[in-house]
Amino acid sequence: LTTKATTYSHQQALGGPLCRHGPKQLFAMRNEVWVFSGCLLRVSDRYTAFAYISGIGMHLDGTLGNASMSAVAASNVYSSYPTISGTPTGDGLTIQFRLKTEGYVWIMLTSGPAGLTIAIIKAGEGAVGGPNCRIKRQRFDDALQTVTLFGCSLQSGPEYTLHAYAEGLDGGDDGSFAGSVVFQVIPSNTFTIYPIITSMITGQGFTFQLATAGVGRR
């Protein structure tokens, strides 16, 4: 029996950690779109997705809803989900993945989490960076792939999310999403002595001191 309490605690949930969501903050009157992956569902079996919402107190006095449908086979899936290889920089990052069968791939980055649909990722809506910072309907075989996104203009500090979608050669919006990957860019340089003013400020100017951990530009 699925209750508010079991849904809240993800008891009886199928699949891995990417096949569940929450707790998440919701905003009034805003449509939410969430991607579930790694659920290990069997084709033709019928499944029910449960959603529980509460007030800001996060108690069990909210509302439980559900929706049911049968699982269908996707035209393509990832046999190895996308992972980030090496350290992301302000210019971009390198990604590795493998498809189960030859097909087409779409990959994009967003600033923070995003509710994606197949139409959104194919159009690249909300993607950060330039055209070289995403993959749009590029064909790959079933070997291990290594691709580099560049021209992304990423900043250190904010969280970014990598999204990936794959489908078969025939196409038809019948593919599958990979689990999203959240990452941050490590600053390319840091202060060992933060900027300080070391003299009196006069009409002519002042003396300013700082020190950095590595060679760089100011």
Image: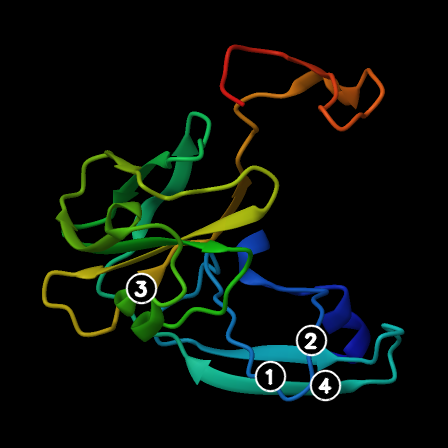
Q: Is residue 187 left or right of residue 51?
A: left
The residue tagged 3 is 124
Distance in Å between CA atoms under marks 3 and 2:
24 Å
Distance in Å between CA atoms under marks 4 and 1:
18 Å
Crowd around label 4: few <14 · some 14–19 · many ≥20 (10 Å): some
Is disc 4 in contact with disc 2, using a CB cutoff of under 8 Å?
Answer: no
Q: Nearer the viewer, residue 163 or 71?
A: 163
Mark 4 vs mark 3: which is more N-terminal?
4
Q: Whole-percent x and y of residue 76?
A: 24, 59
Which of discs 4 and 1 lies nearer the camera? The answer is 1
The residue tagged 4 is 64
Quarter location, residue 117:
bottom left
The residue tagged 1 is 30
Total marks shown come to: 4
- Compared with 172, 104 (above or below) is above
Is disc 1 in contact with disc 2, using a CB cutoff of under 8 Å?
Answer: yes
Quarter location, residue 7:
bottom right
Mark 4 vs mark 1: which is more N-terminal?
1
Q: Secondary structure at mark 2?
A: loop
The residue tagged 2 is 26
For the point 76% across and 28% down, which residue is it?
A: 203
- Tell me the kind of residue under disc 1: Arg
Mark 1 vs mark 3: which is more N-terminal?
1
Distance in Å between CA atoms under marks 1 and 2:
8 Å
Q: Is residue 216 left or right of residue 126?
A: right
- Tell me the kind of residue under disc 2: Leu
Distance in Å between CA atoms under marks 4 and 2:
15 Å
Which of discs 4 and 2 lies nearer the camera? The answer is 2
